[in-house]
Structures are given as structure tokens and as C-alpha cells.
Amino acid sequence: MCLDCAVEIDNRPVKLDIGIGFGSNMGDRLANLIKARRLLLDVCEDPDKAIFSSVYETPPVDCAAETKLFYNAVGQITFSNTPQSILDLCLHIESLLGRNNLHEPNAPRTIDLDLLYAGKVVTSTPQLTLPHPRLTSRLFVLTPLAEIRPELQLPGDNFSVTDHLEALSLNTLKFPIVTRDWQ
């Protein structure tokens, strides 16, 4: 599906529910998540419709051995913008909160905002792939996503978020919840 086609029908903007992954492992991790959430809600279509998971403390994945634990959460926020423009917004927020956009993969970060899905949009460009290509293989994303959208089926997928979580989480520990309320 074309990104531009996904947000306009008959010259009317179409609202998209955008899934966003939040992560932080530097500085005041909870404060970083809260600031990013507020900045996104300030520009979204309907802040009262937004839903957010609890914040979980999770081990780093594919990072250097001395990397600190992450705080991770997921939100679903409605926008009437293209997914690319939301990605640009997320990169801008990361920069505002101290993340250098020229960083090594899996480097420590004050904030990391990942677009996970955008309604039924399926796209793959050098800048953005939706749904996120590693979403269903990451417990630190599936755990909070299953909390807010357990029955969600991503475009082109026959399994729900809960199905993916159950398949990955066999014989693994559950992540501790840091807080359920992070406004």
C-alpha cells in the first residue's frame, strides 16, 4: 500500500492508529518516556483516544555486555499524517531529548521511538518498514503491545499479538512492571 494513498481518500485525510514503541536506558528512563509521550500527544489527532501500556524493565537485546536495562512501553496514537511524517516527528523528538541521530546500532539511548504499525499500511522504504520487521520477534515489544492490543493482527499476518507473545515467551521470565501510570 502506498503511504500517501493510505492517508487520503477523496482528498480527505484518513486517521491512522499508529503503534509506537518507547524505550530508554540512559538518564532518568521514566522521565524520558514521559517527555516523549507528552510531545507525541501534543500533536496527535485525539489525545483522549490514545492508549498506553505499562512501563516494563527489560534486558538489552543485541547490545554491548555492559549496557544498562531498558524501560520499554508501547502506545497507540491516532494521527492524520503519513507514517513517514510520524517517523520524522519521532526522530525530531529523539533529538530534542538528547539522542544523537548519528549513532551505532543498539547504542545506549535516552529515548528510542519505533513505529510498529500504522493501521493496515504495509510499506518498505529505505527509511521505514511497516509493520516493523522485528516486532513479532521482540518480547520487549510484544509484552507491552499485548497489554493494550492483545487481539491485534498485523497486516498480512494470521496470528494475533498474543499468539506471537505466547510462542516467544515459552520458558522465559516475565518482565517486571515499573509503573502502570506514566503520564
Image (cartoon, rainbow, N blue to C red):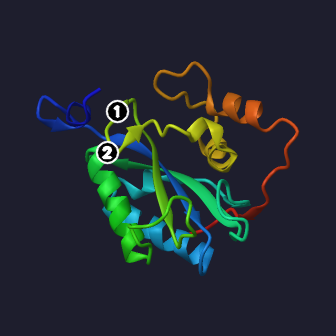
Side of 31 relative to 169 (left or right): left
- Residue marked by disc 1: 123
Residue 137, above or below 67: above
Q: Closest to the observer: 161 or 139?
A: 139
Q: Quick one: 67 or 143, which is closer to the camera?
A: 67
Numbered disc 2: secondary structure: helix
Element on which disc 1 rests: strand
Residue type at mark 2: give it: Pro
Q: Which residue is mark 2?
A: 83
**Measured from the top left, where is residue 41 in percent x and y?**
40, 62
Which numbered mark, 2 or 1, is in the foreground of this view? 1
Q: Locate the N terminus and report the quarter of the image it occupies.
A: top left
Quadrant in the rendering for residue 13: top left
Quarter of the C terminus within the rendering: bottom right
Q: Earlier in the sequence, mark 2 or mark 1?
A: 2
Measuring from the top left, give residue 156's x and y in whole percent: 48, 21
Q: Residue placed at 51% from the left, 29% from the top? A: 154
180, 28: nearer the viewer:
28
Residue 142 on image: x %, y %: 65, 43
**How many marks on residues?**
2
Q: Dot 1 surroundings within 10 Å: few (below 14), some, or many (20 or more)? A: some
**Kind of residue sitting beneath label 1:** Thr
In the image shown, does 182 or 30 lie closer to the viewer? 30
Q: Is residue 146 visible?
A: yes
Query: CB of mark 2 within 8 Å of CB of mark 1?
Result: yes
Q: Is residue 140 above or below residue 176?
A: above
> Which residue is pictured at 68% across the width and 62% down the height?
180
Tell me how far mark 2 sits from mark 1, CA to CA.
10 Å
Q: Is residue 121 visible?
A: no
